[in-house]
Amino acid sequence: MDSGSPDLVSRARDHGNSLYRSGNLLKAEQVYSHGARLAPQDIRFPANLSSVKFEMGNYSETVSCIEKALSLVDPQTDTTMVQKLYVRLVKAYLLSYKFNEAREAISHITTEQDRRALGQSLRRMEAVQSLYRDEKTLWNQVIQRLPRYRPKLADDVEFSAVGRDVAGSVFHSSLADSNQEDYSFLFPNVGDARDVFATLADIGKRSSTKYSLTFKKFYFTLVDLKSAAFARDLLMFRMLADYAAEPERDRRVTLATLSYTFAAHIMPSWAYDRLQTAIHRVMDEIQRNVPLIIGNFYIDATTRDSISNHLLNWQEPPTDWYGTEGILNSTRQQHAEKERIKNGRRADIVPETIRGVTSKTPPPECEPDSLDTLAFLDLSFMLPSALLMREYEPELAELIMEYGFEAGVSITGQSMIDSYHASRRNDSLPNVNFTPQEVVRDLFWHFHHRNVAPDCRGAFEHLMGFFSFVGKWYHKIRGQTMFRMVIDDVANFMELREKGLLSREHPAFPDRYDKIHMSHIPDYAGGPLTVFLHGMPILRHDKASEITFTIALNQEQWATREQLLVEHFLLADRPKTTETFATTLTENPFYIDDVISGGPLHSDEPLMKCPLSWSRTSYEPLAWAKLMPRQELERWLHMHFLKLCLPFPRIDTLSHSVFTLSNTIMFFRLLMHLSRVGYPLHWLSEVLASMCNGEITSQARAPRAKIMDKAEVERKYSKRKISIRPFVEEFKTLLVIWRRLLPFNLLQDESRLPPIETIREYRLRFTWPETLTSVYHPVITLVLWNVDDNGAIPRHTLREALRDDEKTNPKYKGISRQNGRVHVISTVKFNSVTKTASFWFADAPIQGMVSADSHWEAYIFDTNTWVVLSEPVPVNRSNLAQGNVWCHI
């Protein structure tokens, strides 16, 4: 029996309904709950509460409320309400992967359309789940088969011999003072390992005054795409290990060889001989298959084989291209070009901008105008110290004593530049436009040169001083350290780590990290969005563990870091960014606020090179009040999708470009993150369902400027229908592949999606000129064009033909708004050797393109300029090769 007066009950119900319609769900929940207490037998209150709970994504409580409401059904109850409750109950079960319960609830639905649609969804969901009982198998397939970036056409250089970053330790006081038993560090794109060396020296030095550190373990995971980098790093660690036990005379040679290997263009023959000794020792351990190389390096068999290839190569004399004369000539030419570019444009933002935020300064002898630097530019090689010259190069020492530094003076030398590419392309020249003095300046920004290398003069002596410092302190903690080397893309590695999919490794290594030192990798890995999506989940501790990264490319594009974050996250303020991605800026550096707000800090340039550290706040779902409203979330997701599909044209120069590297797959990874943040799963499901129609109703637009600033991100355009048909076939293909990985089920008409057994890999063979290999950034997209319906492809205005908004040229509206006119594919791989594009696609649209009465052509476009790069190739049965299907049912 109702305990409240009819008037109070009616007012509670009306007020709750009004609050629900206005979107004030928290208040509506309170009012409905109050009404249920006033009228416990009134079915409408638990029914309405179930609607609130469902809309807020609380599906277990939705079920409870519906069960309560159904228990109050009597003969007078409106059957329409009962049917709505059962439909909602089925959706709650399906979204939660409770298939048996959903099947039982479907049996109570009497409306034919709802019963058929929900039954079809249930059957498809069960079929998809049965395909991959082990979700890890699908994760491995997705990560290995589907690229996460747009492709590029150029062959990669093998590796950058010398890094350009300021070296620094990642072991800070907060870690040293913690009581944990071990520490775990991840160095993506480790390169020349300068930050690893700095960290080892820092830990060793701290342990001399902090006794507790002598009992700790330190685990270093080193990731790089280039096995050549690992090969060189191993040689340097081999020599550092030898250094501790060598007599003084041999130590000088080892330190000199380390210095030449790390920072020089050529090296003397006596240093080359010492390097060969290190190569032989490492090769011997690899060939004997010792479990730990150099006693503390865990390296899997595949990586060992790859490293061995480089070491074997380096045991052979360099080719002419990589001999002494060739390297010296290249050095002179590249430095001349570097000076010409420097004089012709605004100076780059270089590490000098960090002067305002550190009390340390690099050695004055290594400044750009120092005698040591000028001597190198004159000679094009780095001289050894006077002591080593007298001992190993007496003739050179006599020449210098008699004549001083003169151009043309040569020494008997060997090049320590990887000759791998010389065997592939004789026109591949190494990048040697650096000076040893620049390397030294980068090494000593965070280590005061008077403490690390006292009484040293010039670049060579400072390099020897640095490695003497590293060798001393590394020896002290060497028995406490373990290293693992992994050849992989950093985003792939982090995602594999998060999902527990890495191949078998040494059991001692922790699977989470105290510090992830990204350096400038976000420039090449999809920006800060990739870092936050994949790096935050593998941090070890909330609030204490950190990710650090800097911006190296395109620094002049950003007035502030705030602007950078807005461009990548499309969120107008930093609090919303940090809430959405469960992160916060570490409060350590005193200059953070100035950097974020663009403060100059004693510099005329914004400090984009200053590293900032981010820690994870919590992976608990956000409170409801902190979530974006549903319409705002949809607009935000549409902005991301349109930006991925239709990036704004940018200037086609390396130094000024801002690239959209990620392909459409980023959208699905973003959705997975939002589900973890706490957004209702049916919101996300319905976003996907609406996009499968090929049309969205939105207040978002494709980017209208090179940089998405705060005003543009906040701008709400008039709501209108926008066609995304040029991109929808790729989108549906990827959705079918990804649906088993999504933490929610899809509530939509299954007939719109291709069956997974009809998705297969296709390969198209292209022809293009050699000059096309200059496209060395991942900005390429594949375009399949219906010539019969569209005519000739707009070679310079394709973006205008694909876009559908107020500014669309009327002559292109049919192309973007009709099915089957054009297919744009961003998730594609290019093999530059075979000139083949491979991609996964559903069979039905492909069969339509290759039918006898169709005329389709394929093109390669650069999305940085939206200009066609290739001549057309036919999309027909002879040129389009079929590969394997994604999976068999």
Image (cartoon, helix red, strand yellow):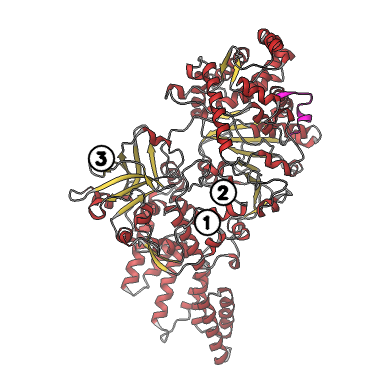
**Which span of residues is magenta-colored?**
447-459
Q: Earlier in the sequence, mark 1 or mark 3?
A: 1
Going by the numbered disc 3, the residue's amino acid type is Asn
On the image, the x and y values in percent for residue 833 come to 37, 32
Give whichever of 337, 442 is nearer the camera. 337
- The residue tagged 2 is 557
Q: Earlier in the sequence, mark 1 or mark 2?
A: 2
Label 1 sits on a secondary structure element that is loop
* Residue 681 painted magenta: no
Q: Residue at x 48, y 31 (%)?
A: 157
Q: Which mark is residue 879?
A: 3
On the image, the x and y values in percent for residue 365 come to 73, 27
- The residue tagged 1 is 708
10 Å crowding of disc 1: few (<14), some (14-19), many (20+): many
Give whichever of 38, 312 is nearer the camera. 312
Total marks drawn?
Answer: 3
